[in-house]
């Protein structure tokens, strides 16, 4: 993207033995890259790692996933494509930014996506924006990507949302100029 001002490098993780396929993951990440382009953020690298780990790590669960990341330091921002979530309430996809990671610091700057997540490309990008902007804010604007409910039609980001994502993302070392 020629007019991009910031570069994003993503690290993707899944686990051998889950239902996720490389094709599903790469299609969703390509779609996410297109959505982030409206904010002049270019995805320049996405590296997929397939982790060999005991079955219990294939599920998102705050204590178990913290343990995983203590043992396996990861490059961030990192997206985890897990079999399911054991947390309650159970969200299809969940983001942990700086602001909501005090009690679980290992999980800062990560997104956890359960197999079968609805509106996968939009859900993934929505959570990634929460992480990059370090904000849990939602929007009520029609067709905004940050509406609380994901939908294939909710794809837009406002200039203010883009600005915050670029500025906070850069300040937190998650985006580079
Ligand atoms: Zn949200």
Image (cartoon, rainbow, N blue to C red):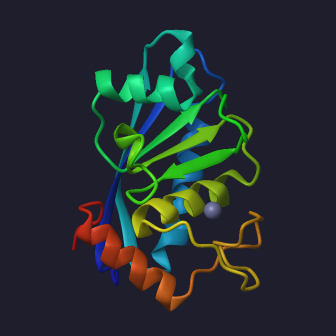
Residue 1 visible: no
Name the quadrant containing residue 22.
top right
Image height check: is 156 above or below 151? below
Asked if one can make out residue 11 in the rendered structure from this viewpoint, the answer is yes
Work out whether residue 159 or residue 107 is closer to the camera in this orientation and state it.
107
- Residue at x-position 70% and y-position 45%: 91
Residue at the far front in the pictured view = 103
For the C terminus, the quadrant is: bottom left
Viewer-proximal residue among 82 and 140:
140
Location of residue 74 in the rendering, given as x and y in whole percent from the top left corner: 30, 36
Residue 167: x %, y % from top left? 32, 78
Camera-side residue of 70 and 78 = 70
Residue 115, by quadrant, is: top right
- The N terminus lies in which quarter of the figure? bottom left
Q: Quadrant of residue 141?
A: bottom right
Q: How many marks?
A: 0
Residue 17: x and y in percent read 58, 15
Q: Nearer the viewer, residue 29 or 142?
A: 142
Describe residue 101's horizontal placement relative to residue 56 as left or right.
Answer: left
Give how far across and how far down residue 111 sits, in percent.
50, 47
The residue at the point 23 percent across, 61 percent down is 173
Q: Is residue 70 left or right of residue 126?
A: left
Q: Quadrant of ligand 1?
A: bottom right
Q: Residue at x 49, y 23 (%)?
A: 64
Q: Left or right: where does residue 127 sit relative to residue 77? A: right
In the orientation shown, which residue stands out farthest toward the top?
Answer: 54
């Amino acid at each position: 993207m020629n007019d991009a001002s910031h570069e994003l490098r993503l690290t993707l993780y899944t686990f051998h033995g889950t239902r996720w396929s490389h094709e599903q993951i790469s299609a969703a990440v390509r779609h996410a890259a297109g959505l982030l382009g409206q904010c002049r953020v270019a995805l320049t690298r996405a590296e997929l790692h397939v982790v060999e780990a005991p079955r219990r790590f294939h599920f998102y669960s705050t204590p178990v996933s913290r343990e995983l990341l203590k043992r396996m330091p990861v490059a961030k921002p990192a997206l985890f494509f897990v079999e399911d979530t054991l947390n309650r309430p159970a969200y299809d996809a969940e983001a942990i930014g700086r602001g909501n990671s005090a009690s679980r610091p290992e999980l800062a700057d990560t997104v956890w996506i359960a197999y079968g997540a609805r509106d996968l490309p939009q859900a993934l990008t929505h959570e990634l924006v929460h992480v990059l902007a370090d904000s849990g804010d939602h929007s009520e604007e029609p067709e905004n990507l940050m509406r609380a409910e994901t939908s294939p039609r909710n794809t837009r980001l406002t200039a203010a949302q883009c600005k915050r994502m670029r500025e906070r993302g850069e300040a937190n070392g998650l985006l580079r100029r």
